[in-house]
Image: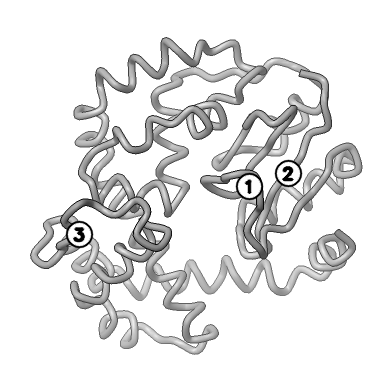
């Protein structure tokens, strides 16, 4: 691939923030095109942010480091030690993908070329997508159970983050406990894992769902600590003057 590398991001994303600042400081930010996803794209679908594309092919997503992006910019190899793990980590770092996994109790709905390609740094890692796709399909039940609790915990963090946004940051641990009711968590999960009705299970009943209960209980138990981390994360972004100067010029 030899086209222009495009980086799609959202201002609230901690990884996007880190990438943009580090690429700027290292002199690489002007070597790529940057797009702020405050509005939906017309012709592309993006699973998560940050999201890298070259020649209309997904080549990277969260979790991703600035060193990896620099290697991609310089057309160097990106080493992927365990492609299956890389795929699952991309699910963990996408609240949308994580929600789909938990709602359906099945990874089949995520065995998607674009998500797989982004997770393995397609075109730069040498990983064969056909072989990986076959391996994930074969091992999907094992992988789901192996990562199930991690996915629930990742969704717990996302839930608290969005509570923080919904209260414009004016939220305390008592609020977290109040809103951690399974009905609220279930409603949030249904909204998170679908676009309208697209992506919903055929019977989207989540009352008494074991995963909803686990997320609810984890948020109620760990909400104070999660909230403190979210506040630190978001305030670090909002208070970074250099970051906002950079992205406001995009």
Mark 3 or 1, closer to the camera: 3
- Give yes or no for contact between labels 3 and 2 (Cβ–Cβ under 8 Å): no
77 sits to left or right of 89: right
**Dot 3 alpha-carbon crowd within 10 angstroms: few under 14, some 14 to 19, many 20 or more:** few
Specify the quadrant of the image occupied by residue 197: bottom left
* Residue at figure coordinates x 80%, y 62% from the top left: 243
Q: Which mark, residue 7?
A: 2
Question: As drawn, which residue projects farthest toward the left?
Answer: 208
Tell me the quarter of the image containing the C terminus.
bottom right
Cα distance in 3D space between marks 3 and 1: 29 Å
Between circles 3 and 2, the one closer to the viewer is 3
- Determine which residue is flagged by label 3: 204
Task: Report, in whole angstroms, how far the alpha carbon at label 1 lies from the one at label 2.
Answer: 7 Å
> Counting residues from the N terminus, which is met first, the one under dot 3 or under dot 2?
2
Whether residue 19 is situated above or below residue 169 in the rendered picture: above
Please report the residue visible at 29 percent of the width from the left and 54 percent of the height from the top: 200
Q: Secondary structure at mark 1?
A: loop
- For the N terminus, the quadrant is top right
Residue corresponding to mark 1:
50
Q: Position of residue 81 (x, y in %)?
A: 49, 18
Whether residue 160 sits left or right of residue 117 in the image: it is: left
Secondary structure, mark 2, is strand
| Distance between the alpha carbons at the discs numbered 3 and 2 | 34 Å
Q: Residue 25: x, y in percent?
A: 86, 47
Q: Position of residue 199 (x, y in %)?
A: 34, 51
């Amino acid at each position: 691939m030899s086209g222009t590398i495009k980086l799609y991001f959202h201002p609230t994303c901690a990884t996007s923030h880190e990438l943009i600042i580090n690429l700027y400081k290292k002199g690489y930010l002007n070597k790529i095109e940057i797009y702020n996803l405050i509005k939906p794209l017309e012709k592309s679908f993006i699973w998560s942010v940050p999201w890298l594309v070259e020649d209309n092919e997904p080549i990277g997503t969260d979790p991703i480091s600035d060193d990896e992006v620099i290697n991609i910019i310089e057309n160097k190899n990106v080493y992927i030690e365990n492609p299956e793990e890389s795929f699952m980590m991309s699910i963990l770092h996408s609240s949308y993908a994580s929600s789909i996994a938990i709602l359906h109790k099945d990874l089949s709905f995520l065995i998607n070329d674009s998500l797989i390609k982004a997770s393995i740094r397609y075109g730069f890692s040498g990983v064969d997508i056909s072989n990986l796709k076959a391996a994930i399909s074969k091992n999907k039940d094992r992988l789901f159970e192996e990562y199930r609790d991690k996915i629930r915990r990742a969704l717990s963090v996302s839930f608290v983050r969005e509570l923080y946004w919904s209260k414009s940051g004016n939220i305390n641990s008592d609020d977290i406990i109040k809103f951690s009711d399974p009905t609220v968590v279930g409603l949030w999960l249904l909204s998170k894992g679908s676009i309208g009705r697209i992506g919903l299970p055929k019977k989207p009943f989540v009352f008494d769902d074991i995963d909803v209960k686990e997320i609810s209980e984890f948020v109620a138990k760990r909400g104070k600590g999660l909230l403190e981390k979210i506040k630190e994360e978001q305030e670090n972004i909002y208070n970074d003057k250099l970051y906002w100067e950079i992205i406001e010029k995009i």
